[in-house]
Image (tube, grey):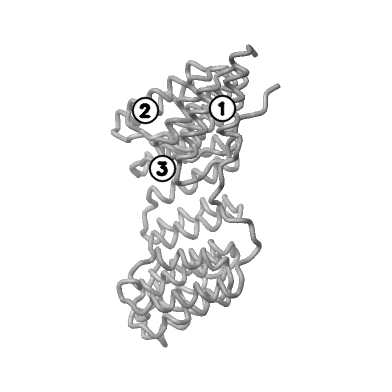
Amino acid sequence: MSSSCSSLYRRLHGLFAVKLKTDKPKTTSLKSKQQLQTIVDNFKKSSESPKFRGHHSKYKTAVRRLDNNYSAIQGIFEHQKQYPEITNEFFVSRLILLYGTAKMYEHARKLFDEMPNLKCQQTVFSFNALLESCIRAEKYDTARELFRELPEELSIKLDVVSYNTFIKALCKADSLDSAVSVMDEMENQGIKPDKVTFNTLLNAYLDSKRFSEAEDLWVLMQKKNVVADLGSYSVRLRGLVENNKVNEAIELFDEMGKKDIIPNAYCYNTMIKIYVDDRNWEEAKGWYDKMVENGRYPDNATFEMLIHFAYDKDNLDFALALCKKALDSKVTVRNATMQRVVNVLAEHSKLEEAMELVKLAKSYKRYRYILSLPSLQ
């Protein structure tokens, strides 16, 4: 390094050697009893407002903040029984789903069974919520039992959501062949499989690397006149790429445009990854450029892939530009990725650029990066 560069480096390093503070909370195993009780008390107080009780997101946030503390979650949900909404099937179904999210299936089932006493009707809507609660709690065998026994017991007529939820449970239980056979059962009951049915099964086939069967299912989807949506195309695109059918993936991407299905970041990332893995810089950047030109917003995965690829290719200007765009777009990339760019810039005597990136990262409010200029000899 030249003496002028060394002097500049020492000056900048002195200004930016102090690491930026992080606003991420310290890792703790559980919240204290006092913290939990405060959350519970505040939630119960807020629940007095009918407007508050109408916000599902408030309940979801409370479950997350309670760190899966079963007694605390049960406490705030039991508290809801004093309010008139407890006679509303939609409201009760929300609680059933959240019990599942917290891995408290037994409490979900208990609440479902209590619905008649709470003067709340039980229809296929709340049954579907209970079935989904099983999946969230990873009680797949229980989901199978529920689906086969409870509707008849309660005279509930299953709908397409019931079947799709059951298919999802079977897929998660690695019973893919059984899940596929449920489609015949649906049609025997006069219920047509829809795009959710096919998308769920397509995903499961690809997760199991059963590519040819996934293609057969795609053909069957067309035969049954089920209109593929963005989710369908995203799944098939992934399958073609994982099966090394790159040309067919490109053709499918073009087909999406002709059918006015706008590819999202996931679709573009799928294509970019092909060329990142193949170490083809021009094609990878070409797909990124196309993504931006078409008004799609790069996400975390886009930036992570291309920033790493850019500095691996010694394209430091582009790596820096991507970091700036991520910060400007309020997309958080990993601290280690950002620090690596700072390091490489400094190693190549681009100290002002490295300083600029550290300064920009410091101004980022959503996540405070812990960045510093490296100590170079």
Q: In the figure, is residue 5 to the left or right of 291?
A: right
Residue 275 in picture, x, y percent from top left: 53, 22
Label 3 or label 1, whichever comes before in sequence order = 1
Distance from label 3 to label 1 (Cα)? 48 Å
Mark 1 = which residue? 12
Tag 2 and tag 1, C-beta contact below 8 Å:
no
Mark 3 = which residue? 231
Residue 195 in picture, x, y percent from top left: 38, 47
Q: Is residue 280 above or below residue 328?
A: above
Residue 68 in picture, x, y percent from top left: 57, 67
Give whichever of 305, 270 is nearer the camera: 305
Quarter that holds the C terminus? top right
Quarter that holds the N terminus? top right
Structural crowding at the residue carrying mark 1, measured as other residues with C-alpha within 10 Å and reported as few (<14), some (14–19) or many (≥20)? some
Mark 2 = which residue? 292
Residue 70 in picture, x, y percent from top left: 58, 73
Q: Is residue 357 above or below residue 51?
A: above
**Amino acid on which disc 2 is placed:** Val
Q: Quadrant of residue 170?
A: bottom right
Residue at far bottom of view: 117
